[in-house]
Image: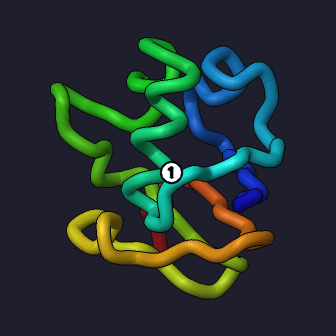
Amino acid sequence: MQINLKFIVVEGAREAFGETEFAFELEGKSAGDLIRELMGKYGAKSERVFLANGHYEINLQIIVNWRKYVLPERMGEFALHDGDHVIFTHLVEGG
């Protein structure tokens, strides 16, 4: 299925993927599958986008279709569908 990706102010994304907005053909079904497949295809540079000390970068938010937040602990069960837009961005602090 085709997933539309957008990385908003994510350090290393342009270096890892060559651009910050692109379509990706996902073989799996979940947000966790998406990240695994991206790291498998794009290698070490993409791992630095998603991982910190070997674990998922908890401050990296996943937003699907601009309205659904995917919790890191639910990535493996959060189903994606053909044509979904997946946005990656960092948590913003302030007030």
Instruction: Residue 87: give x, y in percent of width and height.
Output: 65, 60
Q: Examine the rendered structure and indicate whether residue 78 appears above or below residue 50.
A: below
Q: Is residue 84 left or right of residue 72?
A: right
User: Local crowd at mark 1 within 10 Å, few (<14), some, or many (≥20)?
Assistant: many
Instruction: Residue 10: give x, y in percent of width and height.
Output: 59, 39
Q: Nearer the viewer, residue 79 or 18?
A: 79
Secondary structure found at label 1: helix
Q: Nearer the viewer, residue 27 or 41?
A: 27
Instruction: Residue 50: give x, y in percent of width and height.
Output: 40, 37
Question: How did the renderer colour the structure?
Answer: rainbow
Most extreme residue toward the bottom, as rendered? 67
Q: Nearer the viewer, residue 59 or 22?
A: 22
Residue 91 seen in this snapshot: no
Amino acid type at circle 1 is: Leu
Which quadrant of the figure has residue 71?
Answer: bottom left
Count of marks, rendered view: 1
Q: Is residue 60 left or right of residue 88?
A: left
Q: Examine the rendered structure and indicate whether residue 51 appears above or below residue 5.
A: above
Position of the N terminus, as image quadrant, is bottom right
Please give the name of the residue rendered at 65% of the width and 63% of the height, measured from the top-left corner. 86
Q: Nearer the viewer, residue 38 or 54?
A: 38
Please give the name of the residue rendered at 71% of the width and 78% of the height, measured from the top-left corner. 65
Residue assigned mark 1: 34
Please give the name of the residue rendered at 69% of the width and 24% of the height, measured from the top-left corner. 17
Residue 43 seen in this snapshot: yes
Q: Examine the rendered structure and indicate whether residue 43 appears above or below residue 89.
A: above
Instruction: Residue 12: give x, y in percent of width and height.
Output: 58, 23
Please give the name of the residue rendered at 32% of the width and 75% of the height, measured from the top-left corner. 77
